[in-house]
Amino acid sequence: MRKPALFALAAALLSVSTLATAHAADQSLPTAGEIAPGFTLPSQDGSRISLDSFHGKWVVLYFYPKDMTTGCTIEAHNFQRDQAKFDADNAVILGVSVDTPDSHKQFCTKEGLTFRLLADPEHKVVDAYGSLGTYGTATIAKRNTFLIDPQGKIVKVWTGVDPSHHSGEVLAALDELKK
C-alpha cells in the first residue's frame, strides 16, 4: 500500500516540476547567437514599430521598468546623450516597458527623448525576451538589453544593467563587434 502511494506522490511531484520548468523556460532570456524574436508594438507617437523594419541596422533593444522613474530617466538620458554616436554606428535605439503609449509620450516630452519607446502593456514582447518581472505587486520589465545585428541575430545580452553607464557599455560593444 505504501509503494503505490509513494509512486503517486513521485508522479505528482514530477508533473509539478515539469510544469514549473516549462514556465521557467518561457521566461528564459534569448541568448547571443539566436535570431531575435520578432514583434510589432506601438511607440510614443502611436505608430506601430516592427523589429523587422530595421533589417540592415544594429538594434539596441532595451527593456526598462517604468517611465519617469529615477533609474529609467538616467538610462534614457544617457542613450539620448549618445544618440549621435549610435546613429554613426548605424544603430537604432528602442526602449520597451509595460507602460502605455500615452505614458511614453509624456516621458519623451518631459525628458526631451527623440528615440522610440515602445509600449507592451500586454507583456508579450517583454515575456518573449525573458524580461518580465515584478516590483512589489506591479508587473514591470526587467532592466535587460539585447544588441541585435543587422541580420536580426542577437549578438550581446546584458541583464540587470546599471543605468548610469549602460549606454557607454553598449557603444563599446558595438565598436568591438564592428572590428
Image: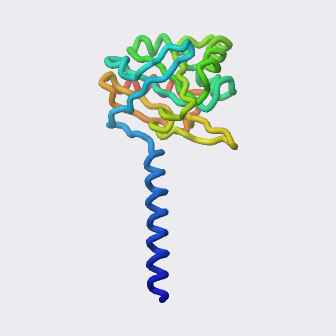
Write the residue at 66% across / 41% down: 135
Residue found 33% across the figure and 19% down from its top: 55
In which quarter of the view is residue 179 placed?
top left
Expressed as whole percent of the image width and height from the top left, the position of residue 178 reads 33, 22
| Among the 4 quarters of the image, the one containing residue 146 | top left
Q: Nearer the viewer, residue 115 or 172?
A: 115
What colour scheme has been applied to the protein in the rendered image? rainbow
Q: Is residue 80 above or below residue 62?
A: above
Instruction: Give the left or right position of residue 35, taking residue 87 as reference.
Output: left
Q: How many marks?
A: 0
Q: Nearer the viewer, residue 130 or 39?
A: 39
**Residue drawn where x is 62% and y is 11% of the image:** 112
**Image quadrant of residue 89?**
top left
Measured from the top left, where is residue 97 in percent x and y? 57, 29
Above-or-below relation of 149 to 142: above
In this view, which residue lies farthest toward the bottom?
1
Looking at the picture, how far across and down is residue 63, in whole percent?
53, 30
Residue 137 x/y as whole percent: 69, 43
Between 63 and 21, the one nearer to me in the picture? 21
Instruction: State whether residue 9 is above or below residue 106.
Output: below
